[in-house]
Image (spheres, rainbow, N blue to C red):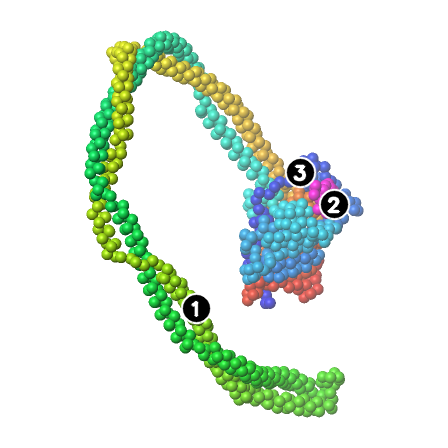
Amino acid sequence: MGRRSRGGTRPRSRGNPRIQGPRVELSARSASARGATEHHGGRSWHQTPDAQRDGAGFPRTPAARCRAESRNVRDARRRIPGSSGSERRRDWRRWLRVKLHRLRLVNFRQHADTEIVFGDGITGIIGPNGSGKTSLLEAIAWAIYGNLAARGDKDSIRNLRAKARAPVRVELEFSLGSHSFRVERGLNNAELYQDGVVVANSLKEVTARLQRVLGMTHDEFFNTYFTGQKELAVLADATRPERAAFLSRVLRHEQLTLAQERIRERRNALGHEVEGLETGLPPQSELEKERKTAEGRLTDARKAATSAGADRTKAQQALTEEEPRWQQWVERRERTLSLHGDLRVAEQGVVVARQEFQRLDKELAEALAAREELRKLDAEVAPISKLKAELAELDRLHREDAARREEQAKVTELMRNLSVLDRRIEELADAEAALARATAEAGALAERLEAADTVASEQQAAWVREKEYANTRRVELLKQHEEVKDQRDKIERLGPEGQCPTCLRPLGVEHRAVLDVLNSQLDVIVTDGTYFKQRIEQLATPPAAVTQAEAARDALREEARQITEREGSLRAQAGERARAQKERAGLAKRTQEIERRVAARDAGYDAARHNAVRTELARLEPVALAAAALSARADRAEALVGEAELAEKSLSTREEHVKQLADAVQAQGFSEPKFQAARERHDRAAHALRAAELAVAETRGDLVAAENAVRETERRAAERAARERTIAERKVELRLHNELDRAFSDLRAELNAAMRPEIGTLASAFLADLTDARYDEVDLDEDYRVVVLDEGVPKPVISGGEEDIANLVLRLAISQMIAERAGQPLSLLVLDEIFGSLDESRRQHVLALLRRLGDRFPQVVLITHIEQVRDGLDRVIRVSYDATTGVSVVRDETATLGPPDASVAA
């Protein structure tokens, strides 16, 4: 892969915002713990609750060294062997540090299948912009912290050119102290191995376990181990507010701002609440006036209720006295009305009884007259019964005659059908014999057809076998010709010094003989191949024997088809003859049965006599009807005599009952005017009671309303007292939040004031190691600018190399501070595009500085697009983008490095 232009600029890493993201939790570190730590190399050892379970303990690093420590004390400590903080740090860093070993990416971003093996020293990942270098850092963070560390959403991680179901996986191997870890993370699954044993196997569990093992959140991890693009000189190029904001952000002081904002929000809410409560508070004098008014209304309502109760009692007593008299009049009226009703019913009964007696008397006279007329009609009615009996017999004979004629017609039709069946049976007499002959012919022809089919199949198989053999032999000869020709060409190309294909010795003088043998073999192969090619062409069409055998077989098949059709026709005729014989037997049997029924039927029907009898009965029908009516009326004469006597007695009884009811009505003495007067007296008493009860209800409502008004005034007074207590409580809480706001402001000022000395102390230790104690003190002024002190005096002018040193130790000090607050040693550095604004000499100087810090940072990873720095690296990994395949290609070019540059190694 060719190198790209060195002058191109590289865009800022998209992962950088997460390195310095907001909302980082503050670590809980007390002032006493910070003050109890040793100066320089002292460490307060402390294990997190999960450290023993996760297989690694983390020493709690100290707070910043006291800024006021004298230079003489530091000089004395440097003179004591083994007493320096850097030496003691090296002792535990050698066994407790984070070290990357291997990284593999499968379908991650533009990496289809990339594997990188890390080592000690300075490893450079070099490649042009957009080649996928920063994706390697993202993969490391994604393997540890999951989707929180991904740029974009989950779906954007998959390689765009990967198949739909292709796996997306990142494998990261690293060590922490004496334990080795391997994490394998996919889009939907994850596994964590500790010393070769699975300790977690889900997305959330793996992320939580690794966070406990490392002792860092995602933001702490990036702010500690990673330095993004152009961050090396970030404090030098920024304004004072920008520098202060940057340090507060990476050291997580912005959480104080968030907490203070929440406190101010709560304080403002409390202020508004107190203002609202005080605004809605009613005056005490108004409440007292309302209470007195309500109590006066209650007294008046109680008096009115007592008076209304007395009036209702008096009205109730008057109604009680009038009620019995009114009930007597009501009962008398009801009895009188009931007797009047009974009287009207009894009078109606007398009328009905009188009418019934008159009707019975009339019907008795009519019955006696009908008996006399019936004697006169006896002579005419006498022959009717004899004529009806004769008509019934003639009707029966008429039905027998009609049935006989119908059955004779059926016999005639059956005889005609029998004649037709006899003719058809005679026509099909030879069908069975012809069927037997056709069956025999079909059997013989089937044997001939089977033999012809066998002959045709054998001819076809022989032709196919010979054609396949010819094709197979020609393919084998072509392959053999190619092999022999390649062997001959190889021997001819190598000449006499070439090896024998059999014994592998030089041919020498045998070279020509071997070539002749191979040429003769080629000639034989060509001859045989030509023969089989012609043979294949001949066998392309079927031979005459095959076509003749197939023609004979097809002719026999046609003949067999015709015989089969004829056999089917004859079999159908034989079946038809059998069915016709069976049908004829059934028809003959049915004909005999009908003939027997015809012979058994009665004869002697006389149609003329039948008509004469009908005519005579029709003439006598009116006389018979009149005689029947007279007979019915005459038969009721005896019964009507008894019914008339009973009706007369009932009429007398009903008339006596009417007289008794009229006397009873007269005895009640009921008068409608007196009844109306009694009703008016009762209505006046009831109306007075209802008016009194209504007055009681009204006064009771007024009483309840007055009581509610009194309770309402009491409730409002209690509510005002409760609101006053609430206002007092909210004012206390408001004063508390005002005090908290001032306290947070003071705390933030103290932290900002203490941050500069702490960063300066840590940077001084790095500076002393880098310059071999030439400079051992760095300070940050009030504008957060780096000031190098020489013998305690600020250097007003520093060289470009010294500026690089100052910027580097400042960034390392910031990372060291974050690591100490997270309880994690700083042993790994990842620097992403830090050379973008540096010239060649400063780049080499930064590499030299990093190499001199090898005891502090045994593993450094540099990501850059600048080719000139490769000679100062221990390992080089090349990353390029293949536009044809759309994937990143990674190569280890460590073997191509030359000897170390003296200027860099110095």
Q: Earlier in the sequence, mark 3 or mark 1?
A: 3
The mark found on residue 829 in the picture is: none
Name the residue that disc number 2 marks. 85
Q: Which residues are magenta?
A: 39-61
User: Is 895 in front, or is 113?
Assistant: 113
Q: Mark 1: which amino acid? A: Ala
For image coordinates 39% across by 16% down, the residue present is 701
Query: Closer to us: mark 3 or mark 2?
Result: 3
Question: Which residue lies under the disc numbered 3?
Answer: 29
**Marks 3 and 1, Cα distance to the nearest angstrom?**
123 Å
Under circle 2, the secondary element is helix
Which percent across, then down, holds residue 587?
40, 67
Residue at image location 60% in from the left, 67% down from the top: 1
Residue 844 visible, this orientation: no
Image location of residue 109, percent across then percent down:
57, 58
Q: Which residue is mark 1?
A: 585
Q: Amino acid at mark 3?
A: Arg
Q: How many marks?
A: 3
Name the amino acid type tagged 2.
Gly
Chain-order first, disc 1 or disc 2: 2
Q: Secondary structure at mark 1?
A: helix
Q: 133 or 307, which is in the foreground?
A: 307
* CA neighbours of label 1 inside 10 A, class few (<14), some (14 to 19), many (20+): few
Secondary structure of the residue carrying tag 3 is: loop
- Residue at 66%, 61% (x, y): give it: 876
Label 2 crowd (10 A; few <14 / some 14-19 / many >=20)? some
